[in-house]
Amino acid sequence: MSKNLSVGSVTPQRAHFASPLLLKSGASLPAFDLVYETYGELNAARSNAVLVCHALSGSHHVAGVYGDDPKTLGWWDNLVGPGKPLDTNKFFVVGVNNLGGCHGSTGPLSTNPLTGRRYGADFPLVTVEDWVTAQARLADLLGIDAWAAVIGGSLGGMQALAWSIQFPERIRHALVIASAPKLSAQNIAFNEVARQAILSDPDFHAGHYAERGVVPVSGLRLARMIGHITYLSDDQMGEKFGRQLRHGERRFNYDVEFEVESYLRYQGDKFAGFFDANTYLMMTRALDYFDPAYDFDGSLDAALARARANFFVASFSTDWRFSPARSREIVEALLHNRRRVAYAEIDCAAGHDSFLLDDPHYHALLRAYLENIEA
């Protein structure tokens, strides 16, 4: 079997859903589109499908490239492909841009059929549970009665967890990586500061900036810089940047003096160049609202009582945003419900972003679990 090959050139697809979608907030979308990509082949029994759920800034483009441009490599290409841990010789892998996203699925940048103008700030708040409901519609369209597995990291892991609760009969394995059963107050606080950076940008225009032909770039830059600080570990930042001066000497001004400042500005500029501000606001609020135990008097045990899937839960030692203790909460609730669960706490210096990296130990664990899934 070939090892570590790419899925090659891929092409996004679009699915249109004409039936209204009732959202958790009580609002409704009259119709919607989802953009998605697939890798590998769906078997005759339609039993080998795996859904990959993306995190806040991710998209449907999980693996491969567009055309021959290596700069368009999918965000989890190191994991998905022939001979890779999520092996497309075995599995039919689906990546979807979540409802409300800014990579082609219906969202704030889309045209509101009721007004003929872009939704902008009028696009309704969408939750993790709403994403899962929309993904189930896509599964129906693709003829997939049950996923062999649903996998995701961070916000994607929350979706995998939600799948096991909302559609317990339609998921055989849930892989919940670098995630949490709900955000801590500190995490909600980080999200609020990031949102305020966007909301206070003069170019935000109450969320209808697209109609004015502008983008709240400053707010997006700051939001991403704040977020990026929380994705890295202190050790990794120290190792990569330390206190290195950009120009080798102090210049006694407020421009970029330290390498870490240069890095954060670069990340902020890059993010502001492709991500939508309203989508960022919506997705961070979806993170805030996610709490399966909310409807069960705060009991995660009770919330997960409906789950029937087997679980793989993984955390990373230096992830202080979604710490290992949060993953252990999920594991304990699953064990309380006598679910089969494998748990890995992985030593990795990269902080929250560890789930995106090609770490040999991490990938070996994923490979071992996925190889044991019957497809």
Image (cartoon, rainbow, N blue to C red):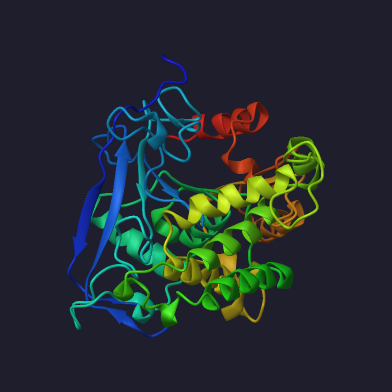
Percent x, y for residue 354?
65, 41
The answer to whether 222 is drawn above or below residue 62 in the figure is below
Q: Can residue 297 be seen in the rendering of this structure?
A: yes
Percent x, y for residue 1?
41, 14
Percent x, y for residue 316?
71, 44
- Viewer-nearest residue: 37 or 115: 115
In this picture, residue 186 sits left or right of residue 20: right
In this picture, residue 163 sits left or right of residue 209: right
Q: Given the current orientation, which residue lies at the most extreme top position?
A: 1
- Viewer-nearest residue: 39 or 143: 39
Query: Residue drawn at (57%, 80%), measured in percent from left and top?
Result: 295
Q: How many marks?
A: 0
The quarter holding residue 353 reads top right
Q: Quadrant of the C terminus?
A: top left
Q: Can residue 375 be seen in the rendering of this structure?
A: no
The quarter holding residue 97 reads bottom left
Query: Residue drawn at (65%, 69%), measured in percent from left and top?
Result: 300
In this picture, residue 204 sits left or right of residue 367: left
The answer to whether 132 is drawn above or below residue 246 in the figure is below
The answer to whether 141 is drawn above or below residue 48 in the figure is below
Query: Residue drawn at (28%, 53%), measured in percent from left and top?
Result: 35
Percent x, y for residue 145?
30, 52
